[in-house]
Amino acid sequence: MSESEGGAKLLGDDGELQFVLFEIEGVTYGVEVERVLEIVLRPEVSRVPSAVDCVEGVINLRGTVLPVLDLRRRFRLGGDAARATHVVILQLQGALAGISVDGVSQVVRIPVAAIEPPPAAITGPQVRYIEGIAKLETKLCVLLDLDRAFDPGEIALTAGGDQDGR
C-alpha cells in the first residue's frame, strides 16, 4: 500500500490494492506491487562474513551488488533458504534489496474490505511486520510491511558500507 505524504494509503479507483504473492515454507505472503521492481530466478548467493543473521548474502544483478534477505530467519520459520527458487527485487528503506522466496504465484487485486488487521492472539515483536491478513478465494495471505521487518543497518551492511557508513 503506497502512502501519500500525509501517510494516508492510496487506493485504486475501485477500492482495491495490488500485491505480489509469494510462498515461503508453505505460507503465502504479499507485498505491495509498487515496491517490486522485478522477480528473478535465484542466482548464486555469496555469503557475507559477519553479516547479521537475516542477511543471506549478496547477488550480482547485471553489475549491481544487492543484499539478499532471508525472511525464514527473520520470521523464525525454520527451513532451508536453498529451497528458494526466486529472488524478489524491491525497494526497501530507500535501497534495492532482494528477498529469497520458494515461489512467486501471482499479482492480485485485493479489495480493502478483504484485509483485516492481525488477530489479537498474534503477539510479540514479529507482529509489527504484518500489515494485515487478506482473505483470498482459497486461502489467507499475510501482507507484509518489509520496512518494519528490517533495521536500516541490516540493509546498509551489504548495500554499500558497514554500520559506521563506510
Image (cartoon, rainbow, N blue to C red):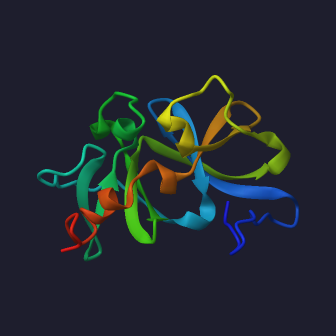
Q: In the image, is 59 to the left or to the right of 16? A: left
Q: Is residue 65 above or below residue 71?
A: below
Q: Who's the residue at 38% across and 63% down the image?
A: 97
Q: Quadrant of the N terminus?
A: bottom right
Residue occupying image coordinates x 68% and y 31%: 139
Q: Answer with left or right where residue 90 lies relative to residue 151.
A: right
Residue 108: x and y in percent read 70, 52
Q: Nearer the viewer, residue 126 or 135?
A: 126
Q: Nearer the viewer, residue 129 or 97?
A: 129
Position of residue 11 relative to residue 141, above or below, is: below
Residue 151 placement (x, y as % from top left): 39, 55
Work out which quarter of the rendered image holds the C terminus and state it. Answer: bottom left
Q: Left or right: where does residue 131 sit relative to residue 59?
A: right
| Residue at point 40%, 70% (across, down) | 95
Residue 52 versus residue 127 in the image, above or below? below
Based on the displayed image, in which of its 4 quarters is residue 54 positioned? Answer: top left
From the top left corner, tell me how far across and down residue 42 is, in percent.
33, 53
**Where residue 115 sits: x, y (%)?**
76, 42
